[in-house]
Image: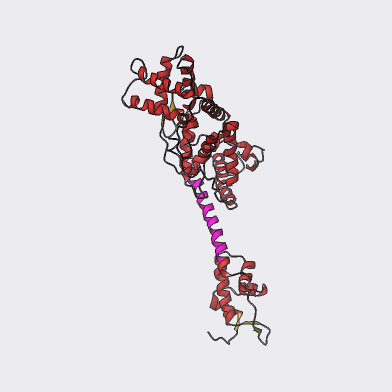
């Protein structure tokens, strides 16, 4: 191209592929400056204008705004700095798109209602601080003042879900279910009882023994009998139960009498609540940990064997537990700690976390929160999906905060409070 030649707007349009009105707009904004004018007063541009317009077109295709482009052209910003900033912005957009895809995939897989989809989406796009606050409220209710005991801080960290920046559909679904479960007052009361009982036992007996956790001890004592097919009834189970109660008496520093055996039975019934195990399963999915071993068979065996030994007590039917959360039978611990929770992947989300999300949920003309669309509501499912996509564009996941000890893997002595976590943890607890 002739470096001394001047070009009309039409010439530039043909050479750059931009529309005449676009070049005129850029010229009016000072992005490309005319080198002169023709005798008729038309703007003329030199060869530098061609190069500038090529750069402008490339940056606009990358969605760089015009004020930033002007600063680059005027050398107020380096091209490298602008490229780095926009690459970071693209990372955010990619995370938003992945989150949107995960929510829609989870909705499609489980056949969610419009309201369930809306709630799942809003839960998924909570900021990291909001998610921590929601779960922190649950953990505060569970541990209260018992976490002043140093080891409870690690247990608490181990029970904290960490939703990834680009979660899979299964993780989004698990997070929504765990959030619902954490808001259940009955479940909170049951977990609080488990934590208090554990804290009370730690105040007795030998701390090195207690570090292993009651349920870890029960598992080790009972698993061989279970594997050998020994029935949880006398006389076959008598030696196993005797060894178990003797070990527990040593832990708490009390005589191995009827009162202690009743206490042990109550403790095992409490930790045998199926919601506790479901929480651990969901936690493992969210955090990308291996699926935790189900301890229901060990606990069921122990409860039935102890019930046969303790006066005025009778064995209960074993609880059938599956990974999908389906459960049969009912233990005294379930009845005592909470109303029966029937597991399954993502039960109804209609009442989930209303104190957290109520202000965020749109209201229809009738004033009812979340009644959207298909059942005679205000918005159809297609429009609801469109709104979901639009809302997600405003979502910005914060950076994960490193909490140090106990994070990123199944953590500190989770077995101590919730009957063995997803896998062995950090430290010398096992």
Chief SS of the magenta region: helix
Whether 417 is drawn above or below 1: the answer is above
Between 193 and 179, the one nearer to me in the picture = 193
In this image, 67 relative to 204: left or right? right
Q: Residue furthest left?
A: 228
Quadrant of residue 64 within the rendered picture: bottom right
Between 10 and 276, the one nearer to me in the picture = 276
Whether 325 is drawn above or below 48: the answer is above
From where the camera sits, is residue 191 visible? yes
Residue 366 place in picture, x, y as percent: 66, 38
Residue 67 place in picture, x, y as percent: 64, 67
Number of marks:
0
Whether 313 is drawn above or below 252: the answer is above
Residue 123 place in picture, x, y as percent: 56, 42
From where the camera sits, is residue 112 visible? no
In this image, 78 relative to 331: left or right? right
Q: Residue furthest top?
A: 312
Quadrant of residue 420 within the rendered picture: top left
Q: Residue at x 57, y 82 (%)?
A: 47
Which stretch is magenta? 83-107
Q: Residue at x 57, y 66 (%)?
A: 81
Assess whether residue 84 is covered by the magenta stretch.
Answer: yes
Assess whether residue 51 is covered by the magenta stretch.
Answer: no
Between 390 and 136, the one nearer to me in the picture = 136
């Amino acid at each position: 191209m002739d470096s001394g030649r001047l070009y009309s707007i039409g010439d530039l349009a043909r050479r750059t592929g931009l529309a005449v009105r676009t070049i005129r707009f850029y010229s009016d904004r000072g992005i490309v400056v005319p080198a002169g004018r023709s005798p008729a007063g038309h703007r003329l541009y030199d060869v530098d204008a061609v190069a500038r317009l090529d750069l402008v077109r490339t940056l606009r295709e990358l969605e760089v705004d015009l004020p930033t482009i002007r600063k680059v052209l005027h050398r107020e910003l380096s091209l490298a700095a602008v490229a780095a900033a926009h690459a970071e912005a693209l990372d955010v957009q990619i995370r938003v798109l992945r989150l949107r895809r995960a929510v829609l995939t989870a909705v499609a897989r489980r056949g969610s209602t419009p309201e369930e989809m809306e709630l799942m989406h809003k839960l998924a796009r909570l900021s990291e601080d909001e998610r921590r606050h929601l779960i922190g409220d649950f953990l505060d209710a569970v541990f209260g003042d018992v976490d002043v005991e140093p080891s409870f801080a690690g247990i608490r960290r181990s029970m904290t879900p960490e939703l990834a920046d680009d979660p899979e559909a299964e993780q989004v679904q698990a997070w929504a279910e765990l959030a619902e479960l954490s808001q259940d007052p009955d479940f909170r009361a049951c977990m609080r009882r488990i934590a208090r009982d554990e804290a009370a036992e730690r105040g007795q007996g030998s701390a090195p023994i207690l570090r292993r956790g009651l349920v870890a001890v029960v598992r080790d004592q009972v698993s061989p009998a279970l594997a050998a097919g020994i029935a949880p009834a006398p006389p076959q189970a008598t030696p196993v139960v005797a060894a178990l109660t003797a070990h527990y008496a040593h832990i708490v520093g009390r005589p191995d009498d009827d009162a202690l055996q009743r206490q042990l039975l109550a403790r095992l019934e409490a930790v045998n609540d199926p919601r506790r195990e479901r929480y651990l399963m969901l936690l493992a999915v969210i955090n990308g940990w291996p699926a935790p071993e189900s301890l229901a068979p060990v606990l069921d065996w122990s409860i039935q064997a102890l019930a046969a030994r303790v006066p005025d007590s009778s064995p209960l039917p074993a609880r059938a537990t599956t990974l999908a959360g389906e459960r049969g039978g009912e233990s005294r611990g379930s009845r005592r700690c909470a109303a029966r929770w029937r597991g399954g992947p993502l039960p109804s989300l209609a009442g989930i976390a209303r104190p957290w999300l109520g202000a965020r949920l749109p209201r229809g003309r009738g004033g009812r929160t979340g009644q959207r669309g298909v059942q005679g509501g205000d918005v159809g499912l297609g429009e609801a999906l469109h709104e979901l996509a639009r809302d997600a564009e405003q979502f910005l996941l914060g950076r994960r905060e490193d909490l140090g000890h106990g994070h990123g893997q199944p953590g500190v002595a989770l077995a101590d409070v919730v009957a063995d976590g997803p896998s062995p943890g950090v430290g010398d607890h096992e």
